[in-house]
Image (spheres, rainbow, N blue to C red):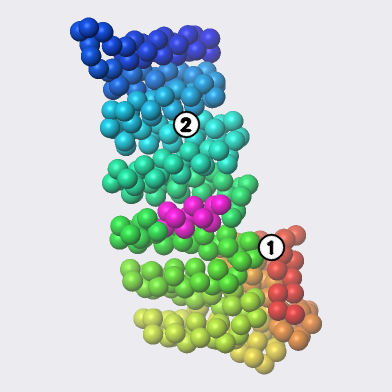
Amino acid sequence: MAAQKINEAHEHIAKAEKCLKTSMTKWKPDFDSAASEYAKAAVCFKNAKQYEQAKDAYLKEAEYHTENKTLFHAAKAIEQAGMMLKEQKKMPEAIQYIEKACMMYMENGTPDTAAMALDRAGKLIEPINLEKAVDLYQKAAGVFENEDRLRQAVELLGKASRLLVRLKRLDEAATALQKEKNMYKEIENFPMCFKKTTAQVLVHLHRGDYVAADKCVRESYSLPGYSGSEDCVAMETLLQGFDEQDEDQVYRVCNSPLLKYMDNDYAKLAISLKVPGGGGKKKKAAAAPQGGSSGAHAAGGEEDDEYEGGLC
């Protein structure tokens, strides 16, 4: 089967080369047909799992689409070349090709396609390079924001914020969360604004900045429905516990289902939060939260110490 596909690929390449030849009656190369034949060759190589040859065929396709001034199709072919590198586990090189394709999408006036490709690239690189994934997600968010596609933009910003927390780049995470919250406010998704306020408070407390955490809650009072909400009461209680150095109170809030079942990176911040000067002791007398005792370590487990001693 593979041998048959490889033979088919070479037949398509031969046809492509024939399309590029000129003669007395054919003055110009047929770049469109050549690109089409190389695309077919690339698929045959891909089906035969000959990924390096498939990549080369896609790059040839891109070259002839460029000659033919069909830049969108050239960008698609370059993106596919990147995917062939991904199949070979050559992730940094794969991302370079995808980023190049994104630049071409932008130049071609198709920014949405560029943003979606950057998002895909972020997902590919995230397991091996969080810093690069943050960069790609933020770039994708910026493209969507420029197009007034705020719902898509804020979703990507959220991915970047969570990874910044995981990387312990908390100053940048605080800035990113504020941008997220502003965007959710603009699209009037106020429940998500509440959640982002909670995340902000956790990040600021881990940064050792009680004043900034308190300010985030005070600013959120202007959001419709925030004052008196479950999120608001929890943050007021948490900040009061910090102010009074009440370890039990802080422990109860941080281990409540509201915080423990946030996105994993923020949940880890919650369960590892310590009262400054309190020695970081979790009092045994503290009551287990209702409805969530079996998942007390769902977000942390053996990784609970990732932010150990964040304020001590």
Residue 5 drawn above or below residue 203: above
Who's the residue at 38% across and 29% down the image?
Answer: 62
- Chain part drawn in magenta: 132-141
Report which residue position mark 2 lands on. 81
Q: Which quadrant of the view contains residue 307?
A: bottom right
Q: Position of residue 306 (x, y in %)?
A: 72, 64
Residue 213 drawn above or below residue 9: below
Amino acid type for the residue under numbered disc 1: Gly
Instruction: Please indicate, yes or no, whether residue 191 appears anywhere in the rendered image.
Output: no
Observer-nearest residue: 114 or 17?
A: 17
Q: Position of residue 299 (x, y in %)?
A: 65, 62
Who's the residue at 52% across and 60% down the image?
Answer: 160
Seen as rendered, the residue at the extreme bottom is 244
Report which residue position mark 1 lands on. 300
Q: Which quadrant of the view contains residue 236?
A: bottom right
Residue 83 drawn above or below residue 151: above
